[in-house]
Image (cartoon, rainbow, N blue to C red):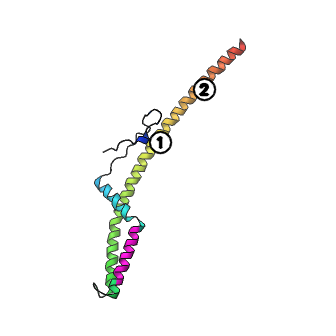
Amino acid sequence: MIVAVHEHDSCPACGHVLSSYQEAEASRGEWWATVIANRVATWWFSAVVIVFLTIWIAVNMYWRPFEPYPVVVLAVISAVLACVTALQGPLILMTQRRAAERDRMRDREALRVASNAEADIHALRAQLDDQLAAIAAALDELRLS
């Protein structure tokens, strides 16, 4: 599905569309990957994990409600963190791939717009050269007469 062109993508003077770039809507998997990556890739998430681990270790070290041997608790925590990391990696890569694809599409559109602008500049330059030549010819005729 294609997202509509935004208001700022049109010329304020005449209203013609400046860019034909339209960002495709993310698939459900890409959307979820972006949501999870945006939540996980924050300092708050890291701080919550560290606080949770600190509390978990403190509770197990002092009151021993879950496991009498803290080394086993640390091994379980490291295994859980390894699983979280293994799951986060592909999500982050999917989000980066989508962002890179979006950037490539924007770059193609920017190149197309720049090429059109360059062609317009050359056409204007040719028209100006023709106008200057006509003015110079008219001045020469006036000087001769």
Q: Which residue lies at the image location 41% right of the left edge and 53% below the top edge? A: 100
| Observer-nearest of 15 and 136 | 15
Name the dominant secondary structure of the magenta segment.
helix
- How crowded pointer 1 is (Cα within 10 Å; few <14, some 14-19, many 20+) is rated as few
- Residue type at mark 2? Asp
- Residue type at mark 1? Leu
Above-or-below relation of 133 to 33: above
Pinpoint residue 37: horizontal percent, then vertical percent. Answer: 36, 61
Pinpoint residue 89: horizontal percent, then vertical percent. Answer: 36, 64
- Mark 1 highlights which residue? 111
Above-or-below relation of 143 to 94: above
Quadrant for residue 78, please give it. bottom left
Q: Which residues are magenta?
A: 44-58
N-term-proximal mark, 1 vs 2: 1
Regarding mark 1 in the picture, which secondary structure is present there? helix
Q: Which residue lies at the image location 45% right of the left edge and 32% below the top edge? A: 14
Q: Are marks 1 and 2 in contact (CB under 8 Å)?
A: no
Which label belongs to residue 129?
2
